[in-house]
Image (cartoon, rainbow, N blue to C red):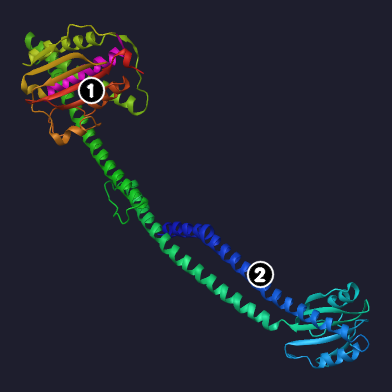
Amino acid sequence: MKMKMKKITGIRRRWIFNSISVVLFIVLLAVTAFTVAMGSYYYTNMLYTLEATADGAASQFRYFQNSYYTFAQSFVNTTADREKLEVEFIDASGLIRYSSSDLTAFRSPGTPDISEALAQGRTRSWTGSDPGTGEHIMAVSSPVIIKGEVVGAMRYVTSLRLVDRQIILIVGAALGIGVGILAMVYFSNLYFVRSIVEPVAGITETAKRIAEGSYGVQIDKQYDDEIGDLTDAINDMSLKIKQTEKLQSEFISSVSHELRTPLTAINGWAETIMNGEVRDASDVKKGMGIIVSEARRLTNMVEELLEFSRISDGRFTLSVEPMDIKAELEDAVYTYREFFRREGIELIHTDCEEEFPLISGDPERLRQVFCNLLDNAAKHGGSGKRIDTAIFQEGNQVVITIRDYGPGIPEEELPHVKYKFYKGSSKARGSGIGLAVCDEIITRHEGTLEIGNAEGGGCVVTIHLPLPENRT
């Protein structure tokens, strides 16, 4: 359980850093940009208004060149909006001569807008904390020019407290919207992540159970997406492992039985002959024949197992050389014909008159395939008392068929007969790997091996091998 929670936490942590952090960055960037834009909008509009007002006031002094102090005092005292604006007349030395508040007269504010306006003869502005009160203000000073000389300046000062409060409220609203968006993204993605984490955790637990030996266990499929595809793959793997495990168990049991049977016969007859219990020469010969036959069967089984082992670990190789495929098949038929005759089985070979060009192949391996298929035909279809073989050319391929007249193979077993360890419902002796080895050999020769039921009964095996002009 701890391991499960650890994995879930790890996924969520990565999601927070990879997803939420990006959304958070975007929200903060958007709020910051919005704040800067709103602040710039409010401050710019206020500055523009103050500058226009200050310039308008300063321009009126040209009508009162000889009595500008009197006009300045009258203008300052009659200015409206005293609660919002402080109007000041600054003399040439930078001192406040008249003020609408009457609280700052004959005081020098010392702000840059005053000195720059008096020195440069242009309207200048300044935003910052008032040197006396510490209040956040905006000040605009417009020079009063009489006869080409700067004799003072009209200064307008306003508090930014209300503007700053408005901006803070707007920023707070923007942050609230951003937090809402972030929360919505978080919870929606949390649901999404949970929809991934929980199925993955379930798949992990099932995979552990499979690793511990609970083959065949299935996972409930909840989603028809990539998680569903993963679930299907795990379920399919679990079933195939179960089938393979079952086949391996059956294979071990079958091989043990197959080895025990000839060994019992060999040991029995060897002890009987050694103890002198059989004195008749014909009986001794019969016993020795059984020993030789069962020993040969054991040898064939061991060779088959060794071949399968080489295929499994990649040591299976071919000794390729130019070979006469027709002659190899005829040799196998000749070898088995007399043996089948003693078993009451007629082996009929249909040959074609034309000669085939030499193909590149391993004669020993292909002869092994022919012998194994003939032996299978006798074991599984020998009850039909007849086996047919044929070889002919079809296009750029040589085709070899081996058919028996036995009961055939159940249709549901046909797709599996070439699988390793598979024996199906047949009661005939064998390891269940012979056809798998044959199929591997034919595939290594760039050919195909097909197994099916023949018309009229029995089983037919068809081998296709490419002729030289069709090989890659």
**Residue sitting farthest toward the front:** 63
Stretch of the chain drawn in magenta: 358-380
Considering only vertical position in the picture, is 369 above or below 414?
A: above
Q: Magenta residues: mostly which secondary structure?
A: helix
Q: Secondary structure at mark 2?
A: helix
Q: Nearer the viewer, residue 49 or 71?
A: 71
Q: Upstream in the sequence, badge 2 or badge 1?
A: 2
Corner quadrant of residue 7: bottom left
- Of circles 2 and 1, the one toward us is 2
Q: Label 1 is placed on what type of residue?
A: Met
The quadrant of the picture occupied by the C terminus is top left
Q: Nearer the viewer, residue 376 or 391?
A: 391
Left or right, 300 with respect to 117, comes to: left
Residue shown at 29% from the left, 26% from the top: 308
Q: Which mark is residue 36?
A: 2
Q: Nearer the viewer, residue 194 or 223?
A: 223
Residue shown at 35% from the left, 13% from the top: 320
Considering only vertical position in the picture, is 132 above or below 40?
A: below
